[in-house]
Image (cartoon, rainbow, N blue to C red):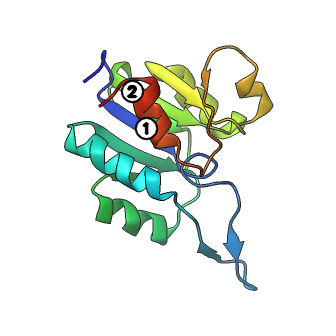
């Protein structure tokens, strides 16, 4: 494993998937789309011994079931994502939302934001700005940028 990174913490909405949601006439989420490259890349990270956690402030059973099927951890965090009990000195985190992700990004060993993240995160100079937009295969870029595999 490269450097001290042992745990990849990825915000779901806006990072692993884009920020668009299909919603039915009763206001329920119907679906989210995950890039095939991310599915393969997450499997590779897990095979190499990394811990991968998908975190969200917006629970959805479909994503929880997909995470379990893939073998990575799924965390529905109602409050501040930075309050979860992990070893932050080993975490590479990815976020996109100023209000929901900034504390998590600030607490992590390494932090990235997706290309279409909130402008305040992209332009503050504190985080790596990925070339990839949310939902377009960000995990592959993480592997490449940080030489994880």
Q: In the rendering, which numbered label is found on residue 9?
A: 1
- Crowd rating for badge 1 (residues with CA inside 10 Å; few <14, some 14–19, many 20+): many
Number of numbered discs on residues: 2
Q: What percent of the width, then of the height, locates residue 149?
A: 29, 31
Is 98 positioned to the left or the right of 42 in the image? right
| Disc 1 to disc 2, C-alpha distance | 7 Å
Q: Is residue 65 above or below residue 1?
A: below
Query: Residue at image x 68%, y 35%?
Result: 115
Q: Inspect this view and state whether residue 85 appears.
A: no
Report whether 121 appears left or right of 130: right
State the residue at coordinates (68%, 39%).
97
Q: Which dot marks residue 89?
A: none
Q: Residue furthest bottom?
A: 25
Is residue 139 or residue 53 the one in the foreground?
Answer: 139
Q: Name the secondary structure under disc 1.
A: strand
Q: Residue at x 33, y 32 (%)?
A: 7
Tag 2's secondary structure? Answer: strand
Q: Earlier in the sequence, mark 1 or mark 2?
A: 1
Residue 86 lies, in percent from the top left, at 34, 32
Task: Classify mark 2: residues with Cα within 10 Å, few (<14), some (14-19) or many (20+).
Answer: many
Q: Nearer the viewer, residue 100 or 2?
A: 2
Task: Name the residue beneath numbered marker 2.
Answer: 91
Quadrant (top left/top right/bottom left/bottom right) for the N terminus: top left
Whether pointer 1 and pointer 2 mark residues with C-beta atoms closer than 8 Å, the reply is: yes
Q: State whether residue 143 appears in this view.
A: yes
Image spot of residue 111 (x, y percent): 52, 24
């Amino acid at each position: 494993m490269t450097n001290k990174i042992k745990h990849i913490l990825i915000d779901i909405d806006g990072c692993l998937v884009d920020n668009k949601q299909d919603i039915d006439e009763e206001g329920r989420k119907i679906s989210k789309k995950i890039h095939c490259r991310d599915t393969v890349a997450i499997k590779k990270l897990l095979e190499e011994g990394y811990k991968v956690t998908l975190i969200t402030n917006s629970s959805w059973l479909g994503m929880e079931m997909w995470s379990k099927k893939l073998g990575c951890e799924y965390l529905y965090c109602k409050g501040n994502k930075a309050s979860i009990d992990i070893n932050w000195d080993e975490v590479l985190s990815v976020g996109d939302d100023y209000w929901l992700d900034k504390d998590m990004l600030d607490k992590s060993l390494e932090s990235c934001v997706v290309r279409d993240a909130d402008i305040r995160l992209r332009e503050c100079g504190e985080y790596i700005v990925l070339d990839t937009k949310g939902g377009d295969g960000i995990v592959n870029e993480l592997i490449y940028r940080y030489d994880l595999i």
